[in-house]
Amino acid sequence: HAYTSMVALLLVLFFGVTGITLNHPEWTFGDAPTTTTKTGTFAFEVAPDGATDYLAVSEDLRDRYGIGAEVSDYQTTGDQGSISYRAPGYAADATFSTTTGEYRVTIEQQGFVGVMNDLHKGRDASSSWRWAIDASGAILVVIALSGLILQLVLKRRRRRAVIVAVIGSAVALVLVALTL
């Protein structure tokens, strides 16, 4: 129990602090989100042969505006195309005309707290980060169960431990019921 707790120390701190900041999205600590909008015209034909060349469009936008996030969505409707990029604390949305090549890019960058909150939720994170969240959850379950078992095995603490566990569970159930 003690060693798994030490392994999870930073995980517990991370998820505890970001849990609080998620509950208070107005707390940016002076690092507020920034939104930038850019417009322009591509120097190449966007839809040669009638098919939108999303790779050329995306690479041009990445080169011009330093977009590093992964593409989350792209589509063409009529003569309008769009590409969306997402990463924790980052969003870039581009819309463009497939006939004229005119485009508009809106980039929103969250501050440090916004990035950490998105990591807490696993939003727009890589699959390796999702595995880290799952591993964190598994470690926390091991800590909770080993602590409970340890308290039940120690005869002196057993009664108090069960009383505290029942009270804590009752409070949690009441809070859940009030929320629903």
Image (spheres, rainbow, N blue to C red):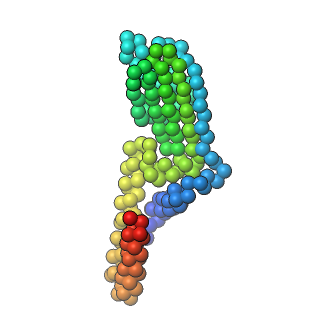
Decide which of 159, 30 is in the foreground and name it. 30
Q: Quadrant of residue 77?
A: top left
Query: Could you say where residue 136 lies in the image, as x and y percent from the top left?
Result: 41, 57
Decide which of 1, 179 is in the foreground and name it. 179
Decide which of 64, 92 is in the foreground and name it. 92
Q: Is residue 13 left or right of residue 175?
A: right
Q: Is residue 19 left or right of residue 37?
A: left
The residue under the point 38% across, 88% down is 156
The residue under the point 39% across, 48% down is 130
Give the quarter of the figure containing the C terminus: bottom left
Q: Quadrant of residue 162?
A: bottom left
**Camera sees residue 93:** yes
Query: Could you say where residue 67 lies in the image, as x and y percent from the top left?
Result: 53, 31
Query: Could you say where residue 175 lies in the image, as x and y percent from the top left?
Result: 42, 70
Count of marks overlaid on the render: 0
The residue under the point 47% across, 53% down is 120
Q: Tell me: residue 85, above or below residue 57.
A: below
The residue under the point 60% across, 38% down is 35
Query: Could you say where residue 2 lies in the image, as x and y percent from the top left?
Result: 43, 70
Decide which of 165, 83 is in the foreground and name it. 83
Give the quarter of the figure containing the N terminus: bottom left
Q: Furthest residue to the top?
A: 49
Q: Tell me: residue 155, above or below residue 176.
A: below
Q: Furthest residue to the right?
A: 30
Q: Tell me: residue 173, above or below residue 48.
A: below
**Camera sees residue 144:** no
